Each structure stands twice: as C-alpha cells, then as structure tokens.
Amino acid sequence: MASAEYLKLLDDMRDLHNRKNAGYAGQSNDPWTNFRECELFGITSADGVITRMGDKWSRLRSLWHNPKNEQVNEPITDTLMDLAAYSLILVCLLQEKKP
C-alpha cells in the first residue's frame, strides 16, 4: 500500500506540471514543446532534459553540502521534485521513440 504522503507528492507533481506546462507550452498541444526546441540548437530533446537534470543535480549537491547556498527561494525539496519531474519527462520522450 502506498503511503498517503507519497501519493500527495504525486498529486503535487501533477499540479506543478499542469501549471508549468501552461507557461511553457502556451497554445501548443505538445506538452514537450520547450524540450523539443532544443533541437533548434542541434540538441536532442532527451539531451535537453538530461542537461536540465544535471543542473538540478548540481544544485542538489550544493544545497546538500551547504544549506546556506540557498539564495533563490528554491528549497531542496523543490529541487528534488524537479528532478523527479524531469525523470518522468524523459521516460515520456523515450516512450515516444518506441516502435
């Protein structure tokens, strides 16, 4: 049985995805528009997501080792949620490529 707290986090991720998607995708019906735009610069969408994950990983390590590095009002829990979201986005992009 899943914990209620874990399921609440999944609901929170859904809400955050919907809000961010409205800002990034705009009028597009493609929820991954902003990631696909990496291709305009010769970078695959998947590599774009992995790059963003790398940025978040660096931030996580920085905050983990020194919480005083928090300067932009993004708590470590937000960084972890972003990493989880990017992981799921990458899963979706990879599933698109399956035959």
Image (cartoon, grey):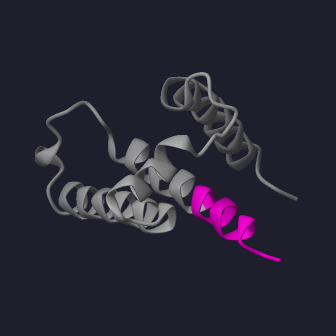
Q: Position of residue 14 (x, y in %)?
A: 68, 36
Q: Position of residue 2 (x, y in %)?
A: 81, 56
Q: Position of residue 43 (x, y in %)?
A: 38, 65
Q: Where 27 falls versus 70 (above or below)?
A: above
Residue sitting at 43 percent across and 68 percent down?
Answer: 47
Residue sitting at 75 percent across and 45 percent down?
Answer: 7
In the depicted view, which residue is nearer to us: 65 or 49? Answer: 49
Q: Which range is magenta?
A: 88-99
Q: Where 20 falls versus 55 (above or below)?
A: above
Of helix, strand and loop, which mostly describes the magenta segment?
helix
- Quadrant into which the C terminus falls: bottom right
Residue sitting at 54 percent across and 56 percent down?
Answer: 84
> Is 96 contained in the magenta span?
yes
Q: How many numbered badges does the structure rendering display?
A: 0
Q: Is residue 76 left or right of residue 86?
A: left
Farthest right residue in view: 1
> Is 71 contained in the magenta span?
no
Residue sitting at 46 percent across and 66 percent down?
Answer: 44
The part of the image, by quadrant, that contains residue 65 is bottom left
- Quadrant into which the N terminus falls: bottom right
In the depicted view, which residue is nearer to us: 61 or 55? Answer: 55
Q: Is residue 95 left or right of residue 18?
A: right
Q: Where 13 falls versus 73 (above or below)?
A: below
The part of the image, by quadrant, that contains residue 68 is top left
